[in-house]
Amino acid sequence: MSSVLLRALGISVQRNGRPTLQPTDFAVRAGETIGIYGPNGAGKSTLLQALAGLLPLTSGTITMGGQVLGRDLAWFDYHRRIAAMFQEPLLLRGTVIHNVGLGLALRGIDRTEREARVRPVLEQLKIAHLADRPIGTLSGGEAQRTSLARALVLEPEVLFLDEPFAALDQPTRRRLVRELGELLRARRLATVLVTHDLTETSALCDRCAVIDAGAILQHGRTQELFAQPRTARVAEILGLEDS
Amino acid sequence: MAPDAWSYWAEIGDGFVGAVRLLITGDNETWGIIRQSLLISVTATLVSMVLGVPLGAWLASVRFRGRGVLLAICNTGFGLPPVVVGLILSILLLRHGPLGSLNLRFTPSAMIIGQFILSLPIVINLTVVALEQLDPKLRLQIRALGATRRQTLWLLAREIRLPLLVAYMAGFGAVVSEVGASQMLGGNLPGSTRVLTTAIVMETGMGHYDRAMALGIVLLLLVALVVGLLTWAQQRDGHR
């Protein structure tokens, strides 16, 4: 079994005094894709944002490579070792190539090196022909490919994906899920994927955590989870209640 | 048309012709007033941008008790009567007043301060509105990209550059065309604190319609320029 890259112990989050994530343990191993699956409002995005260090924790600790975040490793340095992509492409003004190279530019990498690193990723994601297009002219699928390229070009140690294709039409979504699966397997990139799509879960995730009401109900290998849901609620969430 | 009406329109016509002549021939006094107006109003609005944009960014990003009150004060500032600003600052700048030692009364600096106070709430307000209209997740995305605090502010400012331009133009438009505070704080001294609005009031009062109209034309052109720039920027932004 691969070594644990990222480990969360007892992390919880409150918003407006209301707990949105119960104390939770979570581990991400090198090279694996782990899914966070659950219904709307279950706390999936909260857990992902907490793991990505984008939300203040009410309790608990996160360690990366044995270093406690906020103590041994500054949050800012942690953010420079990960990448995140959300349901909306969240592109900034400018062209595709500007957006894809943005994270590198923020790290002070000069234009020549940026170009050299960005071009292959644009090719890989089949958007090289869009490099000089302003982002306002992109389709939904093209915008999400740009967003994914922006994350991948950083060569993150952990990639956080928050329902990245949820807003796309079915054919585009299926195509992107297939391509993402190939990319993740080829790169052996540790990935945390939030989804409420069972097809995505089974196609992409080595392991999966089922979450409801801010608490993880069950986690394990994806196939085992579907074969042996521990409770009726897990079966219901996985759509297995009638089987 | 009655003879009185003819003579009225003839006088207006003469005034207009005289106004165009003053502008075309580069009349020193007229162009001096235009230069001074631009200098004072551009400076005041720039200072309000330098302070107002970070203040607006801060107000848009924090949640604390009393934030609503601060925003309400800014909203009130939107309709701040220039004469009231002029009155309060005049009192403060009186020789024995709290700011009397600065000797700023009837100086361009006093007018810049007055116009800065008038344009600051406009800049703060438009900055807050612009930032609150951005997707809240954009901040998270920028943070996840590894941006420093300064880089985050820069990227967000870049995202709202059109609203920021609107804020500048709105602030400038408001102060370049106000007369109350400028008259009370500057005193309309020739070559120093005489600006377009105070000069128009004075020249009209003295019956110098040609010069008043020349200055009025410039003021109108300035406002048209502001609107034109905004329209151009909006259209250009639509094709980003």
Image (cartoon, rainbow, N blue to C red):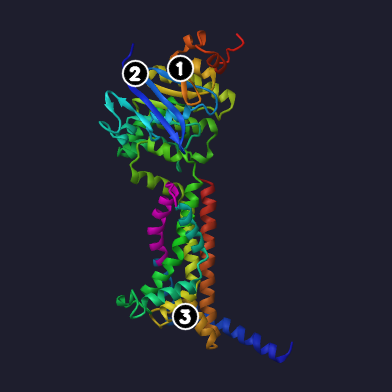
The amino acid marked with disc number 2 is Ala
| Residue at 38%, 38% in the rendered image | B143
Between A148 and A194, the residue placed more toward the observer is A194
Magenta span: chief secondary structure = helix
Residue indicated by mark 2: A30
Between B65 and B81, the residue placed more toward the observer is B65
Q: Position of residue B24 (x, y in %)?
A: 49, 78
**Label 2 crowd (10 A; few <14 / some 14-19 / many >=20):** some
User: Which secondary structure, mark 1?
Assistant: strand
Chain designation of label 1: A
Asked if one can make out residue B130 in the rendered structure from this viewpoint, the answer is yes
The amino acid marked with disc number 1 is Cys
Residue indicated by mark 1: A208
The amino acid marked with disc number 3 is Thr
| Residue at 50%, 67% in the rendered image | B80
* Depicted B93 relative to depicted A206: above or below: below
Chain designation of label 2: A
Q: Position of residue B192 (x, y in %)?
A: 38, 79
**Same-chain status of marks 2 and 3:** no
Q: Which numbered disc covers residue B191?
A: none
Query: Which segment is the magenta one?
Result: B44-65
| A236 within the magenta span | no
Depth check, mark 1 against mark 2: the one in front is: 1
Asked if one can make out residue A127 in the rendered structure from this viewpoint, the answer is no
Q: Which numbered disc covers residue B25?
A: 3
The N terminus of chain B: image quadrant: bottom right
**In the displayed structure, does residue A177 sit left or right of residue B7?**
left
